[in-house]
Amino acid sequence: MDFEISERMKIITNMIDEFVDKELIPLEPEFLTRSFRDLLPVLEEKRAAVKKMELWAPNHPREYGGMGLNLVDHALVSESLGRTPIGHYVFGCQAPDAGNIEILYLYGTDEQKEKYLRPLVEGKIRSCFSMTEVDLAGSNPVMMDTTAVKDGDDYVINGQKWYTSSSDGAEFAIVMAKTNPEARPHLQASMIIVPCHTPGFNHVRNIPVMGEAGTDYTGHGEILYQSCRVPRKNLLGPEGHGFVIAQERLGPGRIHHCMRWLGICKRCFDLMCSRASERIITLDGKTLATRQIIQAWIAECAAEISAARLMTLNAAWKIETLGGKEAREDISLIKFFVAGVMQKVVDRALQVHGGLGMTDDIIIPYFYRHERAARIYDGADEVHKIAVARRILRGYEGRRVH
């Protein structure tokens, strides 16, 4: 891998860092104490400013209004934006829209692209991705009860989903449902576009996550599909290829997540070091930074952040140059490794802040609450560890090592 960052990307990331520092981080006190919906007017102003700077939708196709950055370049952008919870939203590259844009671009019909993809990239609408089910193991996606049964020119969808993130206020959902129950397990499900105003699309609630339900973009919806009827032309890609498409969505998506997590690491690391240097703990004026245990934490966090960053950029480069299949092992490795590093850094930053670290006077507790899920979504850490270990061990079958 070539680790050289182009001059263009240095300029772009410097502009983004400056915007995040001056325009977005000052909004965090309001973000932490008000509903997201209340902040939408000011966030729309910031989005308009980003568009004027020509930094809108960095990873999305040029022909639909994005910057068209490749995966490695967008990874660098995602790291910068990840320092604040509103960064990706303000720059138009937030999940789950980012993943939905990728698969609409790859598999959507011309009609689907004009109706859903273009306004999504332009930031005029939002979307959600409806896959996880309430009573079934999310890490084994072939276990699915939601069905989409053909009835004339329509599909009739029935089932219950949850953690349909950002469904509150979304224009449409991309739903995973079984269309071919007699086929082999990985060829049973399809992806179908369902406008959220469709009768039978019932938004039950925003699920409280560690005491916070969220509103609008920040909510995680529970959706009940009850005889929800949509045209069969809303099928996304070939019928029965839902899992194949999902895998294409998840590879780049994990790069986006991991680099966002590294942005969180950077922010919390900076706050931790600053707090340690300023916090006086003795009558003679010594600070937390003079304590060896704090120094050890800082050294360990610095090393682990650096390792996680290089692993993630290497995985992004491998996907970009060799394809997702060749990068499968790298993708699994970064998924659990970077999530673990992030959790350690956030936890230690909180600890260094003491009682302040438990309050919403600072951003660290927000990261602590909401990013614990990083070790669960997109496949629990344990599943990735088992999968990557099996692939590694297969290389030793029948092989003698001297």
Image (cartoon, helix red, strand yellow):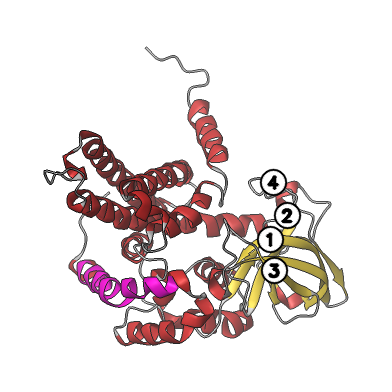
Residue carrying label 2: 134
- Gap in angstroms between the C-alphas marked 1 and 4: 12 Å
Name the image quarter holding residue 10. bottom left
- Tell me which numbered mark, 1 or 2, is placed earlier along the sequence: 2
Q: Residue at x 35, y 66 (%)?
A: 81
Residue hosting label 4: 137
Q: CA gap, disc 3 to disc 4? A: 21 Å
Residue type marked 2: Val
Q: Which residue is mark 3?
A: 205
Main SS of the magenta segment? helix
Q: Amino acid at mark 1?
A: Trp
Is tag 3's residue or tag 2's residue first in the polypeptide sequence? 2
Percent x, y of residue 249 = 54, 60
How much space separates mark 3 and mark 2, taking CA atoms?
13 Å
Of badges 3 and 1, the one in the foreground is 3
Q: Which is nearer the N-term, disc 1 or disc 4? A: 4
Residue at figure coordinates x 53%, y 84% from the top left: 119
Circles 1 and 2: CB atoms closer than 8 Å = yes
Splitting the image into 4 quarters, where does residue 362 fall?
bottom left
The magenta region covers: 10-31
Furthest toward the front, the residue is: 283
x and y, in percent, of residue 124 in the image: 52, 85
